[in-house]
Amino acid sequence: MRRAINFLRDEPLVHFLVAGALVLFVNHFWISQFRQENRTREVVVSIDDQNRLAEIWRMQWGQSPSASEMEGLLASEVREQILYREAIALGLDKGDVIIRRRLVQKYNFLNENIANYIEPSQDELRSYFEQSAEDYRVPSKFTFSHIYFSPDTNSDPYARARAELAWLQAQDPIPVRAPEHGDEFPLQIDWSAAGLDQLQREFGKLFTDALSQSDLHNWQGPILSGLGVHLVYITARENSRKPDFGEVRDDVLRDFMYERSQLATERAYEDILTKYAVRIEGDQERVHDE
């Protein structure tokens, strides 16, 4: 054994073969690196990319780019790709919260787009609608005119409102609107088919509660709002109701697609989470295994 080792150590042919093998290995390594380097340094602006750039230009300027303008767009695209790669190579994306959140957002968009690739059937939408019909309930609507009494210009706006109410009810015929009998109002005087939610935002819940209990075709009040005191003449009222599916199909479709995309995103995250071990330093280690 020792004689064989000595022979291999002293034989020039063996040295030549080993050196040749080493040269071939190094040569192969550097060629592979060179090819990889060439691939990573190649910038390709595809036909789709060029069409995208031209379309963005058309949307912004209302016409197709000229030859020189297109050349500028391509130069900007190449510049952006090169500088992006150099920034990634320097690790400038590491620790940047804005970049991280943007990538997370794009990943979620990807999952949402996949989830919404197939539009649901009518049966699916109808089932979803029936399960959440109250969410689509049409609110009560009111058509009315009112007279406003400001607490800033009246020492007792209630007393003035009651006096005006008595005068209005004594008229024949009773006027359906009489804003001149009150103070200037910052919002509108006449409301047509106004939803209960909208009115509550503008006047407050005390006003809409009183409105819901008021009679039609007669002056009612005084009614308190967040702005002052009112007399109200209601000419029409539509009670809250459950809509037909056809009335709200577009809303149901939008909500269905949104809920499905959110569920798909959450499921995708849960699947990925099983591949990671999560450790929060200073806290109990939490591990997720496949």
Image (tube, grey):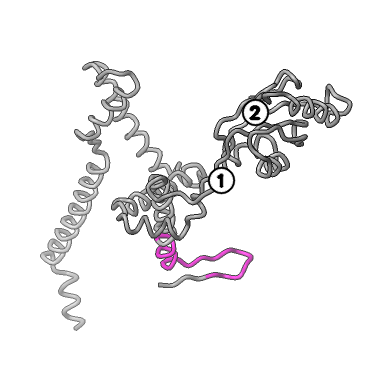
Q: Relative to 21, is 57 on the left or the right?
A: right
Q: Quadrant of residue 38?
A: top left
Q: Relative to 257, is 63 on the left or the right?
A: left
Q: Nearer the viewer, residue 248 or 29?
A: 248
**Callout 2 touching callout 1 (CB < 8 Å):** no
Residue 100 % position (x, y) = 47, 47
Residue 103 % position (x, y) = 42, 46
Q: Quadrant of residue 160?
A: top right
Check the image and report above or below for 273 versus 230. below
* Residue 160 - label: none
**Which residue is at 18% across, 54% downward?**
28
Residue at the extreme bottom of the image, as rendered: 1
Give the residues in magenta. 268-286
Q: Nearer the viewer, residue 274 or 82?
A: 274
Q: Quadrant of residue 70?
A: top left
**Which residue is at 16% across, 72% downward?**
8
Q: Which residue is mark 2?
A: 145
Residue at the extreme left of the image, as rendered: 13
Q: Quadrant of the C terminus?
A: bottom left
Q: Nearer the viewer, residue 131 or 211?
A: 211
Q: Which badge, 2 or 1, is on the more N-terminal residue?
A: 2
Residue 276 % position (x, y) = 44, 65
Q: Secondary structure at mark 2?
A: strand
Q: Is residue 273 magenta?
A: yes
Q: Secondary structure at mark 1?
A: loop
Q: Is residue 82 magenta?
A: no
> Disc 2 residue type?
Ser
Q: Nearer the viewer, residue 111 or 101?
A: 111
Residue at the extreme right of the image, as rendered: 155
Q: Relative to 257, is 44 on the left or the right?
A: left
Quote the CA–CA distance across marks 2 and 1. 18 Å
Q: Which residue is mark 1?
A: 239
